[in-house]
Amino acid sequence: MSIKEVKVPQLSESVAEATLLQWKKQPGQAVAADEILIEIETDKVVLEVPAPAAGVLTEIIKADGSTVVSDELIAKIDTEAKAGAAAPAASATAAAAAQAAPAAAAPAAQKTTGTVAMPSAAKLMAETGVSVSQGTGKDGRVTKGDVIAAASAPKAPVASSLPAAPSAASSLPAVPVNLGPEAMLEGRPEQRVPMSRLRARVAERLLQSQATNAILTTFNEVNMAPLMAMRKQYVERFEKEHGVKLGFMSFFVKAAVAALKKYPVLNASVDGNDIVYHGYFDIGIAVGSPRGLVVPIIRNADQLTFAEIEKTIADFGVRAREGKIMLEELTGGTFSISNGGVFGSMLSTPIINPPQSAILGIHATKDRAVVENGQVVVRPINYLAMSYDHRIIDGREAVLGLVTMKEALEDPARLLLEV
């Protein structure tokens, strides 16, 4: 017997612990080298744990939902064993995980026996896997309300791929049956789901930001017509030349960098009683993911071309959806940009991402009536909002910094010429 240990990857210094999600293999099953065995959720990203060698998974030390730390032993692989061979006795938590797996794999739909169900009730039972043996309808028929009531009743814990709550636990908490959109509109059902580590961390940081920063927001509007015209003129050639679409975010990043260079305090941070001025421009881009908001960093944004910025943002978007953003890509950052406009937001007051001191909020571009040279004309307008920490940034620098961004976006040639 030759045993290979499966351990938790090295976590960053800012991450004390993580949560195991769901094992993709069970004891006695064969695994290939580098095959993903389980995902580990930290308060920032989800990490994949590959098999260190080919063989048979003989023991799971830590079950789904367990809290773990760096380099902790979570499983063992026998590189000489064959699949199906008897595995050594597993730990109590591993045994619980193994017993929970068949329950999770049980057929979803169950039918009632000896009882007539109304068509809508039968459909809902098939969708939710809920079984009702006695109904409240005429002649004991099962109604849709009976199924909803049964689904809402307390159930024994089942195996789940949902992440555990931040507190330590040996198994995942029970999660009610997912009733589906139709069932959620009838009766008074409820569904309780634990916060993921990422969501809990986002909540913690937002509260920290509100409690420690003197947040104030300044607004301005941008006529996007010149920028839209330039993009329309070069969008096809740009994509053909660089292999990536020309969006608006690269212009916003460049405009932000121009303002940060002109007013360095917008790029600074507070450390105790000191103001730390940064001689580099690492711009965080807020990206939505299935597990919550993440803010990956574009390093040295001032040194990148428009194409390099667009490629970086596109890559962040794809990997955020897949949960593959790396820890080091989320650390640091001197200024952030949040684009609520992609969801249709007209105006918002973004919250500073500590320890940064300012953040730019972008919104949806809409045709609006504006006055130019005494005439009312229609222009595509985007409202900009910049929240800043008033402890170190005065209104003058904040307003002039946002004006600098506005002027650069309304005359995009200035961004190319750096004037």
Image (spheres, rainbow, N blue to C red):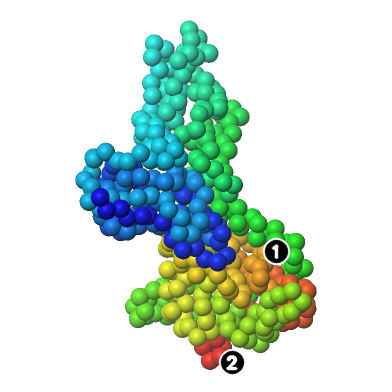
The amino acid at mark 2 is: Val
Q: Indicate whether 277 appears above or below 247.
A: below
Q: Indicate whether 244 appears above or below 45.
A: below
Residue 368's spot in the image, x, y percent? 63, 67
Q: Residue at x 56, y 90 (%)?
A: 418
Residue 371 seen in render: no
Q: Quadrant of the C terminus?
A: bottom right
Residue 299's spot in the image, x, y percent? 51, 78
Q: Residues within 10 Å of mark 1 (few under 14, many from 20)?
A: many
Q: Which residue is mark 1?
A: 209
- Work out whether residue 199 or residue 165 is closer to the camera in this orientation and state it: 165
Secondary element at image label 2: loop
Residue 93 seen in render: yes
Q: Residue at x 67, y 60 (%)?
A: 206
Picture quadrant of residue 104: top left
Residue 375's spot in the image, x, y percent? 69, 77
Q: Which residue is mark 2?
A: 419
